[in-house]
Image (cartoon, rainbow, N blue to C red):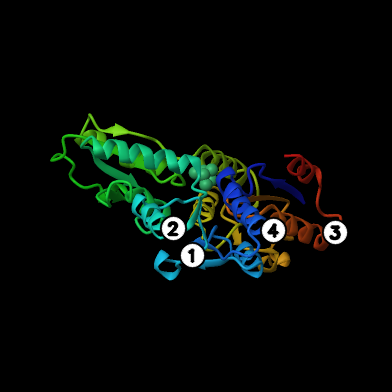
């Protein structure tokens, strides 16, 4: 069996930074309560580890009155940062710089009288956070059929959730531009996402079976699964090695592996080791070495 492992598999820069912020806070503030506002990443195994080290997840600032609160890479609305300030909490803002830049754009254009449109999932924390920089007045669109009539707005500014696909971005912005040729469009899909999606597509279209590793609730992992399914009918989504039925992949000659931006390296390595141990002498290892070098 030939195993092809995506070089882009695993933590992106923003997630790595957020998890590091929590680890650093644990080391530097031994006797202080540490909270994350929402799970720091969409990965159950990482959250379990941090919980064991005493980090608590809260859903709302009303749940606490002191301590350190860490803002995850998805970011939050301006009002939440103000609330944390008013409560005199020690806030560590681990919002990914790419998300921060979207928040700043939205805030600036909103103040200049633009109607903000966010392409993305209205229930995703990143989108909710971005919307919080224009007083929750944005229109959120997640498919081309739900693009509202924008004729009535003189000035429109469009941004995208960082993890959507280019196809979705293009479908929606084409429709908005038809209605409103002067709309200001920002393709804010993050490069890390784009590269990971492109590599997943390339690998998936060249293998017999594709394994995508990542949280079942992770939005960016779910998108990789969809992209992979479109290019490889034998796509398997797993969270950890425990979910992998080794018997079901033995028949394939070429297997690809990719992983979401919130999947830690150790989980990917566990899956690879598990495959190697159970498919003895059946795996050619060249690709693993190239993954380990990155
Ligand atoms: Fe940031 Fe892109 Fe990751 S926006 S959190 S580097 S997917």
Q: Nearer the viewer, residue 201 or 181?
A: 181
Look at discs 3 and 2 and give the one toward the viewer. 2
Place of residue 198 in the rendered image (x, y in percent of width and height, measured from the top left): 55, 40
- CB contact under 8 Å: marks 1 and 3: no
Label 1 neighbourhood size at 10 Å, few (<14), some (14-19), many (20+)?
some
Look at discs 1 and 4 and give the one toward the viewer. 1
Among the two numbered marks 2 and 1 on one chain, the one whose residue lies closer to the N terminus:
1
Instruction: Name the disc covering residue 88, or none.
Output: 2
Residue at which label 3 appears: 280
- Tell me the CA gap for discs 3 and 2: 57 Å
Q: Identify the residue at image location x=52%, y=66%.
A: 57
- CB contact under 8 Å: marks 1 and 4: no
Q: In screen coordinates, is 277 left or right of 266?
A: right
- Tell me the CA gap for discs 4 and 3: 20 Å
Q: Identify the residue at image location x=22%, y=30%.
A: 181
Residue at which label 1 appears: 66
Residue 210 seen anywhere in this rendered image of the structure: no
- CB contact under 8 Å: marks 2 and 1: yes
Q: Identify the residue at image location x=30%, y=47%.
A: 144
Place of residue 62 in the rendered image (x, y in percent of width and height, measured from the top left): 39, 68
Is ligand 1 closer than 8 angstroms to the Cβ of mark 2? no
Q: Secondary structure at mark 3?
A: loop
- CB contact under 8 Å: marks 4 and 3: no
Count of labels in the image: 4
Is ligand 1 closer than 8 angstroms to the Cβ of mark 4? no
Residue at which label 4 appears: 267
Among the two numbered marks 1 and 3 on one chain, the one whose residue lies closer to the N terminus:
1
Q: Nearer the viewer, residue 97 or 149?
A: 97
Label 3 neighbourhood size at 10 Å, few (<14), some (14-19), many (20+)?
few
- Tell me the CA gap for discs 1 and 3: 53 Å
Place of residue 48 in the rendered image (x, y in percent of width and height, measured from the top left): 63, 68
Among the two numbered marks 4 and 2 on one chain, the one whose residue lies closer to the N terminus:
2
């Amino acid at each position: 069996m030939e195993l092809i492992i995506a070089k882009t598999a695993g933590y992106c820069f923003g997630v790595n930074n957020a998890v590091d912020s929590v680890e650093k806070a644990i080391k530097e503030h031994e006797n202080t309560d540490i909270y994350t506002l929402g799970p720091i990443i969409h990965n159950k195994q990482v959250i379990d580890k941090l919980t064991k080290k005493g980090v608590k997840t809260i859903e709302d600032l009303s749940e606490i009155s002191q301590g350190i609160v860490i803002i995850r890479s998805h970011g939050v609305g301006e009002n939440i940062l103000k609330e944390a300030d008013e409560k005199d909490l020690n806030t560590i803002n681990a919002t990914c710089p790419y998300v921060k830049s979207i928040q700043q754009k939205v805030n600036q254009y909103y103040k200049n009288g633009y109607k903000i449109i966010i392409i993305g999932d209205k229930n995703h924390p990143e989108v909710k956070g971005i919307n919080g920089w224009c007083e929750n007045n944005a229109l959120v669109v997640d498919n081309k059929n739900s693009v509202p009539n924008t004729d009535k707005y003189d000035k429109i500014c469009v941004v995208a959730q960082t993890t959507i696909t280019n196809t979705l971005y293009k479908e929606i912005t084409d429709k908005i531009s038809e209605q409103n040729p002067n709309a200001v469009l920002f393709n804010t899909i993050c490069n890390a996402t784009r590269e990971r999606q492109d590599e997943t597509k390339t690998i998936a279209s060249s293998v017999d079976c594709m394994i995508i590793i990542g949280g079942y609730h992770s939005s960016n992992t779910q998108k990789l699964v969809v992209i992979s399914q479109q290019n490889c009918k034998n796509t398997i989504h797993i969270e950890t090695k425990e979910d992998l039925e080794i018997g079901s992949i033995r028949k394939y000659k070429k297997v690809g592996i990719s992983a979401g931006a919130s999947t830690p390296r150790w989980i990917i390595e566990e899956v690879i080791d598990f495959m190697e141990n159970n498919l003895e002498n059946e795996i050619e290892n060249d690709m693993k070495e190239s993954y380990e070098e990155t």
